[in-house]
Amino acid sequence: MTVKFPMRLPPTGRPHLLLALALMLPLALALGACSTTGFDAASTGAPESEDSLYATSPANIESLTRVVQQNPNDPQAYNMRGSVFGKGGRYNEALADFDKAISIDPNYAQAYANRGLVYRETGKLPLALADYNKALSIDPNYANAYLGRGMVYRQENKLIAALQDFNKAIAIRPDNAQAYYNRGLLYQSQNQHNYAIDDFTTAIGLSTQQAEPYIARGLSYLAVKNYKAAASDLDNAVAIEPQNVQAWVSRGLAYERMGDKEHAAGSYARALNIDNSYQPARDGFQRVGGQYGQSYQTY
């Protein structure tokens, strides 16, 4: 195919986590901002559901609104609709629904955790932390709340506290791909790449159709100079998410490190076709001698 540019406390048995932040590939730092956890729509502590076009569709929201109107004193109805609003980025409406659910049932842990996620997504970390703490005071075995709080701690650079929460989330729910992925990002930020690779591998095994763990593992493979493994992971990432700029730029870097300038240029060109202003793609394209208007092999 051608493309033309157009214009811890660690788990038991692991060494102590380094406290000083090490220099990382710039893209690895960007990955941390992309990680998230899903909204819990049910009152049973169910795992986060996959995003879908239907979930945030007007028809589904209209259906959930009818449920709310028919059950004005049911906190779960507001929580369910708020979850959908949150998935669709309609944060003010989501907050209103979670506030209502909590006013009806002040001990509704899922609504606190969901509201905490909205606060975290909108950069209101102290409010997010307060809601996660409240959710955990109600339900000390709520894995998603530990995961969400751990992500807040990681954003606040409270690395040991973050690692403890990720470990707790994994202990409660060993099938939680997001917890392994986020713990892997934490190890990666400390240059603990072998442990990061282990966690990303587990996350991939639990959720094979997510590009982010492949990108993250590819970056750790790059850091340990296993360029062939990195390229393989990033091939998978772009296959899963063909419009993911980070995946294409990371793939370009892997092929660049292997000395394959043709495929590197093709990857950088694909990234630039998606976002012409993305500077890492521009820099990479220039490094490998890319020429505007020329066609390059991507596979």
Image (cartoon, helix red, strand yellow):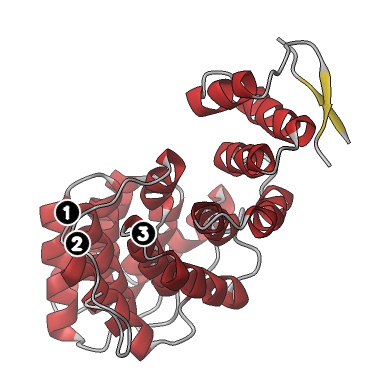
**As shown in the figure, which amino acid type bears the numbered disc 3?**
Asn
* Residue 33, percent from left and from top: 36, 48
**As shown in the figure, which amino acid type bears the numbered disc 1?**
Glu
Q: In this view, does 68 lie to the left or right of 63?
A: left
Q: Which residue is drawn at 25% across and 53% down?
A: 120
Element under disc 3: loop
Quarter of image, res 195: bottom left
The residue carrying pointer 2 sits among few (fewer than 14), some (14 to 19) or many (20 or more) residues within 10 Å by Cα, namely some
* In the depicted structure, whether residue 276 falls above or below residue 165: above
Task: State the residue position of label 1.
Answer: 156
What is the quadrant of the C terminus in the image?
top right
State the residue in front, 97 or 3: 3
Element under disc 2: helix
Task: State the residue position of label 3.
Answer: 191
The residue carrying pointer 1 sits among few (fewer than 14), some (14 to 19) or many (20 or more) residues within 10 Å by Cα, namely few
Quarter of image, res 267: top right
* In the depicted structure, whether residue 278 falls above or below residue 15: above
Q: Residue at x 70, y 55 (%)?
A: 228
* Residue 130, percent from left and from top: 10, 64
Quarter of image, res 109: bottom left
Q: In this view, does 58 lie to the left or right of 193?
A: right
* Residue 104, percent from left and from top: 17, 73
* In the depicted structure, whether residue 21 falls above or below residue 160: above
Task: State the residue position of label 2.
Answer: 153
Spatial CA distance of label 1 from label 3 is 19 Å
Element under disc 1: loop
Residue 68: tell me if it is visible.
no
**As shown in the figure, which amino acid type bears the numbered disc 2?**
Tyr
The residue carrying pointer 3 sits among few (fewer than 14), some (14 to 19) or many (20 or more) residues within 10 Å by Cα, namely many
